[in-house]
Image: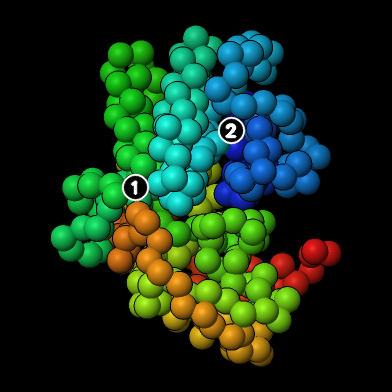
């Protein structure tokens, strides 16, 4: 199949591109390479086509006319909770108006299916854990709000225009190629500090928990979504909660170095706990997480240690 991957030069998107190519598909990556977005030209494999373009660009029509994608995998986004809290208008411009631009061109271009990177941030702080697809969405950050709104637009485009979709609500994705210089992605940020023998900052009290899911497992969910999950929304997580303090202790063991710690305040928009039950994804997509956290952290640490910078 011909697959357009927006944000395909980014952390998660590039692993999805790798998985699609390995499965024998033809892939075009579209990415703005925004400095705060984590997109890197070197993340795009040689076998993939590449277009340097913003998803809000009206010239997107020529991409659809020339490549004629059968599938659109939409991972281009403003993905930082902190940036969304500081600049909600910019967040909405990228995550809502950009999405609508891609959806409109997908309809005009006869795309068969739209795979969307949603987020566990759409749930906010739930009344109970673990969260699943029945958990009410009550986002607490502009980023989470735009991801929730996007899911509503997907339902509209399916009912109004017949554009099929699958939305994947990610837990905290980590792994090789994650940007260690951003404001999100605590594992990558910590690893960079550990390798540089520098101290780390732990916000709040460090006991806040997240559900960390390995990026290559996430990529596999996107492969399965090519032919499964029509009109579905799925939690993609491990059903395991891990605190920031636990991450720190595990990295101390992996690195053989105990980085000094400074405490920081709670970040605006941060939820206290997160845990996602992937039972529906297993039943309908055939997906389940395969990589234990310590193993994934070790692979991520080894990858970062091999990088020149």
Q: Nearer the viewer, residue 172 or 182?
A: 182
Inspect this view and state whether residue 290 appears: yes
Mark 2 residue element:
strand
Q: Earlier in the sequence, mark 2 or mark 1?
A: 2
Q: Which residue is mark 1?
A: 141
Residue 79 horizontal side relative to residue 152, left or right: right
Please say if 123 is above or below 207. Answer: above
The colour scheme used to paint the residues is rainbow
Q: In the rendering, at what x and y percent does residue 295 appear?
A: 57, 75
**Farthest residue in the right direction?**
308
Q: Which residue is mark 2?
A: 6
Residue 63 horizontal side relative to residue 309, left or right: left
- Residue 170, labelled with which disc? none
Q: In the rendering, at what x and y percent does residue 248 appear?
A: 52, 80
The residue positioned 40% from the left and 46% from the top of the image is 85
Inspect this view and state whether residue 228 appears: no
Task: Find out whether the residues at labels 2 and 1 contact each other: C-beta distance under 8 Å.
Answer: no
Residue 250 horizontal side relative to residue 191, left or right: left
- Sort mark 1 into few (<14), some (14-19) or many (20+) by Cα contacts within 10 Å: many
Q: Nearer the viewer, mark 2 or mark 1?
A: 1
Q: Nearer the viewer, residue 206 or 70?
A: 206
Residue 40: name its quadrant: top right
- Sort mark 2 into few (<14), some (14-19) or many (20+) by Cα contacts within 10 Å: many
State how far apart marks 2 and 1 are (Cα): 23 Å
Quadrant for the C terminus in the image: bottom right
Q: In the rendering, at what x and y percent does residue 209 appear?
A: 36, 70
Quadrant for the N terminus in the image: top right
The residue positioned 30% from the left and 66% from the top of the image is 272
Mark 1 residue element:
loop
């Amino acid at each position: 199949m011909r697959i357009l991957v927006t944000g395909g030069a980014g952390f998660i998107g590039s692993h999805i591109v790798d998985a699609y190519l390995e499965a024998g598909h033809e892939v075009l990556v579209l990415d703005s390479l925004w400095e705060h977005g984590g997109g890197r030209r070197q993340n795009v494999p040689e076998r993939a086509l590449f277009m340097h373009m913003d998803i809000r660009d009206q010239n997107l029509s020529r991409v659809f006319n020339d490549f004629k994608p059968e599938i659109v995998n939409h991972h281009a986004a403003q993905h930082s909770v902190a940036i969304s809290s500081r600049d909600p208008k910019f967040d909405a411009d990228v995550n809502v108006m950009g999405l609508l631009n891609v959806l409109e061109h997908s309809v005009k271009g006869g795309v068969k299916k739209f795979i969307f990177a949603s987020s566990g941030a759409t749930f906010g702080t739930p009344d109970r854990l673990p969260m699943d697809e029945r958990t009410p969405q009550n986002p607490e950050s502009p980023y989470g709000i735009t991801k929730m709104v996007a899911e509503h637009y997907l339902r509209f485009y399916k009912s109004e225009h017949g554009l099929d979709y699958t939305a994947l609500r990610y837990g905290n994705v980590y792994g090789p190629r994650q940007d260690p210089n951003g404001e999100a992605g605590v594992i990558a940020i910590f690893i960079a500090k550990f390798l540089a023998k520098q101290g780390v900052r732990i916000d709040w009290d460090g006991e806040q928990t997240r559900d960390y899911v390995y990026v290559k497992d996430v990529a596999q969910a996107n492969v399965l979504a090519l032919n499964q999950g029509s009109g579905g929304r799925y939690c993609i997580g491990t059903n395991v909660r891990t605190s920031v303090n636990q991450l720190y202790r595990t990295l101390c063991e992996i690195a053989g170095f105990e980085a000094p710690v400074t405490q920081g305040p709670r970040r605006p928009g941060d939820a206290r706990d997160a845990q996602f039950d992937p039972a529906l994804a297993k039943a309908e997509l055939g997906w389940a997480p395969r990589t234990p956290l310590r193993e994934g952290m070790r692979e991520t640490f080894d990858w970062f240690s091999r990088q020149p910078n």
